[in-house]
Image (tube, rainbow, N blue to C red):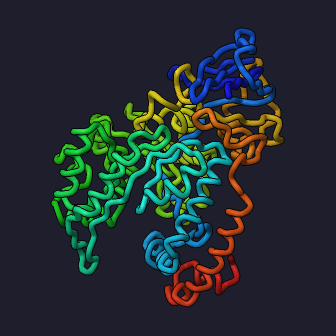
């Protein structure tokens, strides 16, 4: 149906700033925005459904540009441990007990959480991407930019991983471009997991195909000590230096994390017009590091937000990520003006759209763009009071006070997914129940090997601190 939201405060991001319209209205025809302006200029007769947006903010849907949703069953299983323990001791003994179907159940739970807190686009990075798309994203009606993981490690014994080029993995990823070429909601990118996990042969093949057919690449870049050691031993240089040499650094690359980079390497990435996505809660929890989002923006680069995965992050909630990166950046720089609220909203919307190659489709409220938008109820106690004069306090409140649960309407491609805080066609209770049952079973089966790992989490449990 054609619908309009009127008498609302619009945050459009039509220009460089938030471009707020008081007493605004947005009109939707089919899957596109057809009107953005003042309510007094809206021709209500053109719309079959009118929504009262008073006491609400209406804004672009949020963008989670880097998410591994399949691990969402393992919330709270690998927190507050030393970085060296996180993967092998805390998470590893549990992950090996997950069945293939558990990743789908976990993905349903993770995407459900993202939707409820206003995320409309997901940069999904996973193996068996087609299953996640068919069983989660398509039924939920989400917009997804998916990367099929390409990981060519065949042996981790010794100091340097043994890699072997895999035509099968590359072809599996390559086939997805054709499979979803006609979809309005699904885009595909190449997903080489990291420079230390793929052969140069495969990476060069990916670059050739991406350049030839105007495709994007989504890749973990400069994540830390493990990767640094592998790349230095293998190539005698850093990840950024090797990617520059191979001409991988360019505007069709979305580089995740990038925290193990020098100031000069950050500058190199920015000058190449590579897009950067940081995951503040995850990286702060796992590594005790602040993702260099503010640094990239200060250098003139494009940076956006992701939630990564639940065992590190604890949530798939971009409102939380906005607040986290703002506060961490202020502390890192010793500067309370670093990453102000309006800029956080921009990196969660407009910047994310650019990073995922969708800047002409989504990320701002403009006529002709896809109708991916959300409304936020300002009557919630934590967003009150809401004032317009002598200045608006709405934007700071959204970033620093919102939990994401104030989102009450979510539209994707013009279709309403969440109405008055309730999902239209998603059985939320069934998904939560299924996730609860499977998580309990997995953790029960993993208990013995988990205890043998003797991680910091095991110590917490022994001391009755969990």
Using the image, determine if residue 277 lies above or below residue 359. below
Look at the picture and state if 188 lies above or below 231: above
Q: Position of residue 174 (x, y in %)?
A: 30, 52
Which quadrant of the structure image shows residue 445? bottom right
Q: Residue at x 54, y 38 (%)?
A: 348
- Residue 268's quadrant in the figure? top left
- Nearest the viewer among 242 and 248 is 248
Q: Residue at x 54, y 35 (%)?
A: 349
Q: How many marks?
A: 0
Measured as percent of width and height from the top left, residue 2 is found at 67, 25
360 shown above or below 69: above
Q: Position of residue 456 (x, y in %)?
A: 55, 79
Q: Residue at x 60, y 61 (%)?
A: 314
**355 lies left or right of 167:** right
Image quadrant where one finds the C terminus: bottom right
The structure residue drawn at horizontal position 72% and vertical position 28%, both measured from the top left corner, is: 393
Q: Is residue 244 above or below residue 340?
A: below
In-front residue for pair 438/22: 438
């Amino acid at each position: 149906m054609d619908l309009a939201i009127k008498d609302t405060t619009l945050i459009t991001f039509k220009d460089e700033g938030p471009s707020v319209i008081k007493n605004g209205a947005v009109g939707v025809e089919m899957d596109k925005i057809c009107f953005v302006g003042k309510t007094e200029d809206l021709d209500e007769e053109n719309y079959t459904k009118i929504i009262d947006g008073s006491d609400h903010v209406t804004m672009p849907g949020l963008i989670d540009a880097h998410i591994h949703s399949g691990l969402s069953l393992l919330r709270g299983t690998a927190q507050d441990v030393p970085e060296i323990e996180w993967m092998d001791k805390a998470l590893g003994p549990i992950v090996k007990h997950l069945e293939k179907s558990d990743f789908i159940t976990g993905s349903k739970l993770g995407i459900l959480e993202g939707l409820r807190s206003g995320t409309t686009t997901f940069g999904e990075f996973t193996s068996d991407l087609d299953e996640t798309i068919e069983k989660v994203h398509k039924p939920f009606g989400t917009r997804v930019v998916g990367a099929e993981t390409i990981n060519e490690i065949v042996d981790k014994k010794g100091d340097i991983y043994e890699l072997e080029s895999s035509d099968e993995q590359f072809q599996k990823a390559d086939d997805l471009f054709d499979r979803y070429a006609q979809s309005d909601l699904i885009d595909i990118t190449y997903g080489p997991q990291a420079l230390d996990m793929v052969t140069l042969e495969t990476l060069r093949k990916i670059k050739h195909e991406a350049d030839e057919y105007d495709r994007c690449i989504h890749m973990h870049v400069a994540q830390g000590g493990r990767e640094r050691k592998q790349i230095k031993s293998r190539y005698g240089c850093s990840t950024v230096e090797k990617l520059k040499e191979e001409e991988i650094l360019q505007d069709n690359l979305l580089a995740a994390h990038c925290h193990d980079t020098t100031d000069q390497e950050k500058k190199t990435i920015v000058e190449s017009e590579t897009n950067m996505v940081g995951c503040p809660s995850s990286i702060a929890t796992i590594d005790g590091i602040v993702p260099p989002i503010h640094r990239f923006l200060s250098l003139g680069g494009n940076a956006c937000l992701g939630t990564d995965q639940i065992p590190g992050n604890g949530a798939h909630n971009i409102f939380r990520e906005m607040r986290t990166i703002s506060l961490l950046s202020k502390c890192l720089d010793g500067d309370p003006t670093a990453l102000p609220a309006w800029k956080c909203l921009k990196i969660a919307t407009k910047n994310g759209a650019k990073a995922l190659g969708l800047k002409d489709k989504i990320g701002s409220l403009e006529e002709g763009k896809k109708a991916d938008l959300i409304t936020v109820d300002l009557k919630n106690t934590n967003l009150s009071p809401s004032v317009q004069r002598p200045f608006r306090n709405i934007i700071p409140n959204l970033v620093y006070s919102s939990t994401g649960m104030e989102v009450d309407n979510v539209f994707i491609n013009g279709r309403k997914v969440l109405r008055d805080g309730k999902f239209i066609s998603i059985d939320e209770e069934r998904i939560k129940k299924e996730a609860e049952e499977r998580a309990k079973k997995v953790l029960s089966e993993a208990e013995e090997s988990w205890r043998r790992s003797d991680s910091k989490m095991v110590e917490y449990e022994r001391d009755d601190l969990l």
